[in-house]
Image: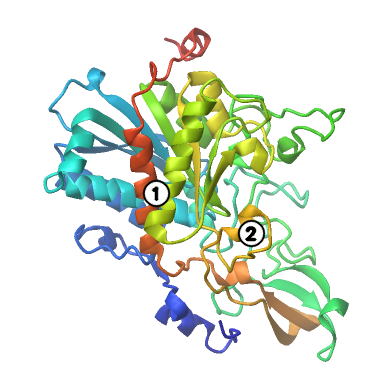
Amino acid sequence: MKKFTSLFLTALLLIAPCGYVSAQSNKEAATNLKSINWDQRHTIDFHESLLKNLSDQYPKIAKTYPIGHTWRERKINAIELTSNTKNEKDKTGIAVIGNIHGNEQESAESASYTAWWLATNYDSDKKVKNILDNYVIYIVPVMNPDGYAQSFIYPIRENLRPTDRNGNNIVFSDPYKDTDGDGIIADIYVGAKNSAIKDRKKIGMESPDWDKNGVFGDDPKQSNIDLNRTFDYLWNYLDVDANPVLGGNAYTRAGSNPAAEPEVKAVQNFLMTKKIHALATLHTGIQCVLTPWCNTSEKPKDAEFMEKVSLDMKNALEKTTGRKFYAKQSYDDYPTSAEMIDWTYGRLGIHSYTIEVYAGGKSNPNGTIDEQCTWENELPADQWVYKGEWNGVKDVWFKNTSKAQMVGVAPSEQSKMVEGAKDSILTMIYSEPYGPGSEVPGYLLWGNGW
């Protein structure tokens, strides 16, 4: 891809070169359900409106309701898809959770697409009719709506727990802002106009210095919390005396207590009220299907079954997208603790899978398995723009990183990606029922007042 320049970057995003498409932001985009453009990036308003419109237009098979709220009082919405041809207690429950990490927007697109596909094809596709006649499908497209909305400004993973990073006793007192109107939040450096990149010194992030402390963007709207390290299963697990150290990946991002974040609490409480046989949580960053355990190399009781299903799910992704994916136990990818799939399997006995739907960029055929499995698309190169004097500082450079340039921009052939994710989820659905389904421990029921 040609190097972007600040003079026409905004125009490039609007006309979407090389297959990239900018955000579809208005609520009306989800109203005409037959003509949604799944190659576009959609805002939080779109996902909320889509679920409501599916329920309004297909009331016999779809209902939408909030399962909780975020720190910013955004609703965490779920859609429940099933027909009334059979008693619900005789059906198999399936859960799909998208966008636990705000900047992994492709995961929300994939979850919303799956809900849309099931609802709009029930009357015309015997395969869909069979699914909704025999299963109850619960889909939460955006588990982290605060992080999702904020990731249209800068690509953050976190939720928005009120956080004071610079110690001035005011939360989020110096958030990022696009001061030059190019649609990108830049890393701010200083260095002479003819300086080499290695000689430039970073002094902050693009911001007008709202708190006037002389440091740009030092208290952004980010919490440092990774919601997928905060579930109530081996929370904050850390063995410094192990070799290698176990739990170090999660320790600094696990929050104040297990399931203390409202988004995690909402999902845990919701899943404990439903009879779920299988669950998929959707992510991006690599292209694969992962199974429990995340915290240990030991095999779970249902390892043979879940490994077979995950391989079939991986094959479905490859067949539909034309891209390479892999399957493995999550620990073997990299060890973590207190992830969703360990909680859902370890606490409730739900067969659980992480589907990583997209890894941007070109593959390295000689690299590790995750470096070989990518979307095979061109990403923009980092861009350096000399600003001269800016906000009272001389010799300022803006570094527009590749990831910052991709904010709110869909990858090429996103429609293939969401179709592949849907086919992988269908593969998981067809693998159930197997065993008794989720079994909520008595102490969890008692703790919820049951």
Residue in the foreground of this view, choosing between 330 and 172:
330
Q: Which residue is mark 1?
A: 316
Query: At 46% from the left edge and 56% from the top edge, which residue is drawn?
Result: 106
Answer with left or right where residue 28 lies relative to residue 355: left
**Towards the viewer: 293 or 410:** 293
Q: Quadrant location of the N terminus? A: bottom right
Q: Amino acid at mark 1?
A: Ala
Is 347 placed above or below 186 here? above
Using the numbered discs, state the Cα–Cα distance from disc 2 to disc 1 in whole angstroms.
20 Å
Residue 142, position as x, y percentages in the image: 43, 46
Residue visible at 27% across and 58% down in the picture? 30
Residue 129 seen by the camera: yes
Q: In the rendered view, would you say 149 is above or below 236?
A: below
Q: Residue furthest bottom?
A: 194
Mark 1 surroundings within 10 Å by alpha-carbon count, few (fewer than 14), some (14 through 19), many (20 or more): many
Q: In the visual, does 15 lie left or right of 253?
A: left
SS at mark 2?
A: helix
Q: Which mark is residue 163?
A: none
Residue 372 at x, y percent in the picture: 60, 60
Quadrant into which the C terminus falls = top left
| Residue for badge 2 | 371
In the foreground, 360 or 224: 360
Q: In percent of the image, x 71 and y 47: which residue is there?
A: 164
Q: Position of residue 317 (x, y in %)?
A: 42, 52
Mark 2 packing: few (<14 Cα in 10 Å), some, or many (20+)? Answer: some
The relative height of residue 97 versus residue 322 in the rendered view (above or below) is above
